[in-house]
Image (spheres, rainbow, N blue to C red):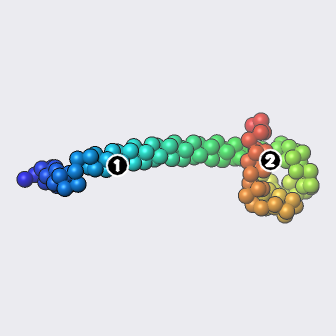
Amino acid sequence: MSDSGTILTTIGLFMLRIGLPVFLLILSGLLVYQTGRRRQLTVSATQSSINESREMTMKNKWEHISGEWRQFSGEAKKRWGQLTDDELAQIDGNRKALASLLQKRYSIAKKEADKQIDAWAANLKV
């Protein structure tokens, strides 16, 4: 007997043992689970793609900001007035250095500093 024949025989015996209504209930539950799982995986994959796209866009934008730091340091000074011109010059477009300085100067967590930098960079006209 082939593998598919063995599987069908096993399913048939299982169905006879538990009864058709119970078997159908179990089968419908599995189908709903599989459909939901497939939908969940699709949504998860789509969200992942969107996040990767945003990260690449922000990365490209920051590369531009970094390359033109002298131009954008004035905008950073407007946003974070407690930073001095010398500090902004020392940062020289280094995002990590800016985040670190914001953490120290404004007593905020790294995550908050990153959030502020992302929001600031997103609003810049590059």
Residue found at x 57% / y 42%: 50
Question: Can you see residue 56?
Answer: no
Give the residue type that dot 2 points to. Answer: Trp
Q: Quadrant of residue 82?
A: bottom right
Image position of 38 (left or right of 55): left
Could you classify mark 2 by the number of other residues whose Cα lies within 10 Å: few (under 14), some (14-19), or many (20 or more)? many
Give the residue type that dot 1 points to. Answer: Leu
Of 40 and 31, the residue lying toward us: 31
Q: Nearer the viewer, mark 1 or mark 2?
A: 1
Residue found at x 7% / y 53%: 1
Residue found at x 38% / y 44%: 32
- Is 24 drawn above or below residue 14 in the view shown? above
Image position of 11 (left or right of 1): right
Mark 1–mark 2 Cα distance, whole angstroms, equals: 57 Å
Disc assigned to residue 69 = 2
Residue found at x 90% / y 55%: 83
Of 83 and 72, the residue lying toward us: 83
Measuring from the top left, give residue 88's x and y in whole percent. 86, 54
Disc assigned to residue 115 = none
Image position of 34 (left or right of 7): right
Name the residue beneath numbered marker 1: 30
- Is 41 drawn above or below residue 84 in the view shown? above
Q: Quadrant of residue 6?
A: bottom left
Kindly indicate whether the residue at mark 2 contacts the one at mark 1 (C-beta within 8 angstroms). Answer: no
Q: In this view, which residue lies farthest toward the left?
A: 1
Measuring from the top left, give residue 120's x and y in whole percent. 78, 45
Measuring from the top left, give residue 35's x and y in whole percent. 39, 43
Image position of 81 (left or right of 18): right
Could you classify mark 1 by the number of other residues whose Cα lies within 10 Å: few (under 14), some (14-19), or many (20 or more)? few
SS assignment at label 1: helix
Q: Which corner quadrant holds the C terminus?
A: top right
- Is 83 drawn above or below residue 48 in the view shown? below
